Image (spheres, rainbow, N blue to C red):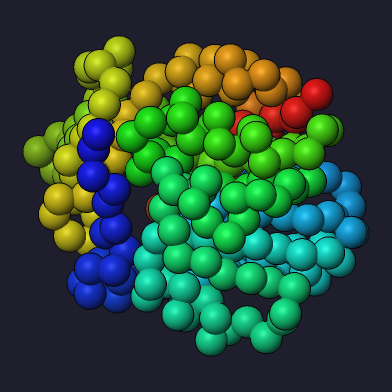
Amino acid sequence: MPSIQNIYDDPAFHEGYRSLRESGTGLNDVLEQPALRSLLPKSLTGLDILDLGCGFGDFARYARQQQAASVSCMDISAKMLAAAQQMTDDTAIVFAKSAIENLAATPFANSQFDLIVSSLALHYVADYRAALSDITARLKPGGRLLFSVEHPICTALAAQKWHQDEAGNDLFWPVDNYRDEGPRHTRWFVDGVIKYHRTTESYVNGLLDAGLQISRLLEPEPQKEATNAKWDNHRRRPPFLLLAAQKP
C-alpha cells in the first residue's frame, strides 16, 4: 500500500502555499472556490458538514457563517491545522489530524453528515475507490458529496507545463499517457510532490459504483471579472474538475 504523503508540513512548501493563499489571487480563490460554492445546497442552515482536507479552515468558517449546525474538519498537516485553529473561534467547528485514507479511525468515524466537502485533496489519495467507500458510509440518506480535484488533463503528465515556442509563448498543453493511472512525481514549491492521476471516467464511475447519484460536473473557467491576461490560459484547458453527487 502506498505511503500517505504529507507535503504540506514541509517548511518550504508550507511557506509557499501559505503566501499564495494569503494573497487571495491564486486559482483556488479566483476559480475553484467560486465553482465549489456554486454546487452547495441553497441553504446550509442546520447541516452537519465534514470537510476532508480542510487546510486553513476557510470553508468551515464560511459554512458556519451560512448557519451550518456543525463542521467537522480533518487534515493531515499539523501546520495547516495549527493555523486553522488560530483563525477559528467557534466551538461548532472541530479539527482532527488525519489523512483521508484514515477516515474510519478519526473521531468522526461513527458520525453521519448531511454534506461532505473536499477541496483539491482527493488527487493526493492513492485509492480513490476505497476513500469513496468510507465517505459514502458517512453520508446520511439524501446527503451530498462535493469535491474538486486537479483536472485529469493536467495530471496526465508530471511536468504540468505548457509547451512553449522559442520566445516563451504558450503554444499548447500536452496530454500523454492519459490512460495510465497512478502516481505522478512533480514539482510544486518543492520537488517530490506526488499526485495520483486518474481519468475523468474513473472519477465519475467511482461515484456511480459507490452507489451515489451524480448531480453535476463542472470544468470551471475564471470568473468574468478575472479579465487579467494571466487567466486566459485557464480558458484554453480546464485546471479543475468538480463533481457533486447524492446518496439515495
- Vertical placement of residue 85 versus 180, above or below: below
Q: Is residue 164 visible?
A: yes
- In terms of depth relative to the viewer, which is nearer, 225 or 110? 110
Locate residue 112, reporting x and y percent: 73, 47
The residue depicted at 15 percent of the width and 35 percent of the height is: 165
Q: Is residue 219 visible?
A: no
Locate residue 21, reporting x and y percent: 45, 69
- Vertical placement of residue 19 versus 244, above or below: below
Screen quadrant of the N terminus: top left
Q: Is residue 224 left or right of residue 247?
A: left
The residue depicted at 38 percent of the width and 40 percent of the height is: 125
Locate residue 188, reporting x and y percent: 24, 54
Outermost residue on the left side: it is 166
- Vertical placement of residue 211 versus 82, above or below: above
Locate residue 225, reporting x and y percent: 64, 55
* Image label count: 0
Classify residue 19 by image quadrant: bottom left
Classify residue 59 by image quadrant: bottom right
The residue depicted at 41 percent of the width and 53 percent of the height is: 99
Screen quadrant of the C terminus: top right
- In terms of depth relative to the viewer, which is nearer, 38 or 126? 126
The residue depicted at 49 percent of the width and 35 percent of the height is: 131
